[in-house]
Image (tube, helix red, strand yellow):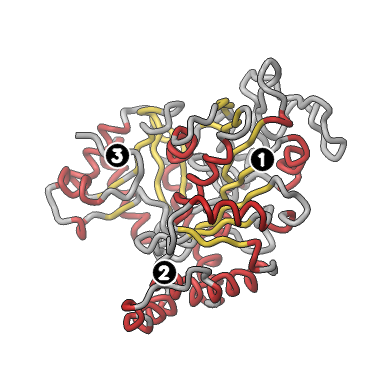
């Protein structure tokens, strides 16, 4: 039996490996190995006595913490039951316009959210061929997703009608591969993308995305991995949210703070849109423990700084080790994961790693553009990374 599309299915992996789930070294889910923060655990413990009460339906304290964190009024922020719930609400929004452009390969949950309300999807592939080509000296810079600063349009016309003069949209390598006519006009269409991009790890700059805010009726940017970049490097659109009522930014608190079991994300958008989303969903989507953990984690500057210090060298160690193995080609990444092209079957490699080494990598079968020749691995501690590299070396040789 094949695993389900999402990574992190330790029950499936343990059954295949013939060991308890706790024995699996999980590289399939892109979760920081540094957490959860002690501050979040302490906050959860402090709230156990409040489980007999309903959560605050307005999540006033959580929204205030997020407001302070992003320097935005609280009414511009809506907490949710993970970003998955907020993606579903986005899917309902997209179903009300002519079509939605989806940059592919795309996270499988995007298709689920769009299909839930029969939203029309236009798939626009990005070109992976240049991603990961690193020039001389790259090993000294680390992998920041900037080795190739643009995706080729893969043969698809990319010029926007009435292009925004603020960027060179008519250049040979446009920032995003947006489809031409006869598709619906962009003013009647939506755009859904994530930044950094999953599964490639590509980081789009604000300048690359900015023109499309002028063109599309609705732009939803999933920034689930943006917080892995320090503030002086991130390319978040949150700073533009009050300028563009058609912009929605989604954030997740589960990956950076290692809290996927609590299910917590939030949307940042115009208050009128968020008020409408409130009417569409069930009450109390965020539980008391998740809200408390989030408030504590947002204020944990020490944990945030430790994560920003850990990631670049650990990611570079993993990239360099993979690049030295025959038949494997890792791609540059700005996130806490690497996409790796393989000359041999990934399904076979995944099975061998589980059965012989209890190591779990993420196959890319759910990304139909990638199939059985790509896998994705989270960046973990240096010792965990080395364990993976040692096992892969034995198998690929």
Q: Could you tell me if residue 140 is visible in this image? A: no
Q: Nearer the viewer, mark 1 or mark 3?
A: 1
- The answer to which image quadrant residue 304 occupies is bottom right
Element on which disc 2 rests: helix
Tag 3 secondary structure: loop
Whether residue 297 is visible to the viewer of this picture, yes or no, is yes
Query: How far, Cα to Cα, is label 2 from label 1?
Result: 29 Å
Q: Earlier in the sequence, mark 1 or mark 3?
A: 3
Q: Position of residue 22 (x, y in %)?
A: 21, 60
Circle 1 SS class: strand
Q: Residue 379: image x %, image y %?
A: 43, 54
Sooner in the amino-acid sequence: mark 2 or mark 1: 1
Q: Nearer the viewer, residue 323 or 235?
A: 235
Name the mark on residue 218. 1
Distance in Å between CA atoms under marks 1 and 3: 30 Å
Residue behind mark 3: 4
Residue 183 in the image: above or below residue 48: above
Q: Are marks 3 and 2 in contact (CB under 8 Å)?
A: no
Marker disc for residue 290: 2
Q: Quadrant of residue 162?
A: top right
Q: Between disc 3 and disc 2, whose residue precedes?
A: 3
Q: As rendered, which of 381 and 22 lies closer to the eye? A: 22
Q: Position of residue 224 (x, y in %)?
A: 52, 53
In front: label 3 or label 2? 2
Alpha-carbon span between mark 3 and mark 2: 25 Å
Q: Residues within 10 Å of mark 3 (few under 14, many from 20)?
A: few
Q: Residue at x 71, y 35 (%)?
A: 216
């Amino acid at each position: 039996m094949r695993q389900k599309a999402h990574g992190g299915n330790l029950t499936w992996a343990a059954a295949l490996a013939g060991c308890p789930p706790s024995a699996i070294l999980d590289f399939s889910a892109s979760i920081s190995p540094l957490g959860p923060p002690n501050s979040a655990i302490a906050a959860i413990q402090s709230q156990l006595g409040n489980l007999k009460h309903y959560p605050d339906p307005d999540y006033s304290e959580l929204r205030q913490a997020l407001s302070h964190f992003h320097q935005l009024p609280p009414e511009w922020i809506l907490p949710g039951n993970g970003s998955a719930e907020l993606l579903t609400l986005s899917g309902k929004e997209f179903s009300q316009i002519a079509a939605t452009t989806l940059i592919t390969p795309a996270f499988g949950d995007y298709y689920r959210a769009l299909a839930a309300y029969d939203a029309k999807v236009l798939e626009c592939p990005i070109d992976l061929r240049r991603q990961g080509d690193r020039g001389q000296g790259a090993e000294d810079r680390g992998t920041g997703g900037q080795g190739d600063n643009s995706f080729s349009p893969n043969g698809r016309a990319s010029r926007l009608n009435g292009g925004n003069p603020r960027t060179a949209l008519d250049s040979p390598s446009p920032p995003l591969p947006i489809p031409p006519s006869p598709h619906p006009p962009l003013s009647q269409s939506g755009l859904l993308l994530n930044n950094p991009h999953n599964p490639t790890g590509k980081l789009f700059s604000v300048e690359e995305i900015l023109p499309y805010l002028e063109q599309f009726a609705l732009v939803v940017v999933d920034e689930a991995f943006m917080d892995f970049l320090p503030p002086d490097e991130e390319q978040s659109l949150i700073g533009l949210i009050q300028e563009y009522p058609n912009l929605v930014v989604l954030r997740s608190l589960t990956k950076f703070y290692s809290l996927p079991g609590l299910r917590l994300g939030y949307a940042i958008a115009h208050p009128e849109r968020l008020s409408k989303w409130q009417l569409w969903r069930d009450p109390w989507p965020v539980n008391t423990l998740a809200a408390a953990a989030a408030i504590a984690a947002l204020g944990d500057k020490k944990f945030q700084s430790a994560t920003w210090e850990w990631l670049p060298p650990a990611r570079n160690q993993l990239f360099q080790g993979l690049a030295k193995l025959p038949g494997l080609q890792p791609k540059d990444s700005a996130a806490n994961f690497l996409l790796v092209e393989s000359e041999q079957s990934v399904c076979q490699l995944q099975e061998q790693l589980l059965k012989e080494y209890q190591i779990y990598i993420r196959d890319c079968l759910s990304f139909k553009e990638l199939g059985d020749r790509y896998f994705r691995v989270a960046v973990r501690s240096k010792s965990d990374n080395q364990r993976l590299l040692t096992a892969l070396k034995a198998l690929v040789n």
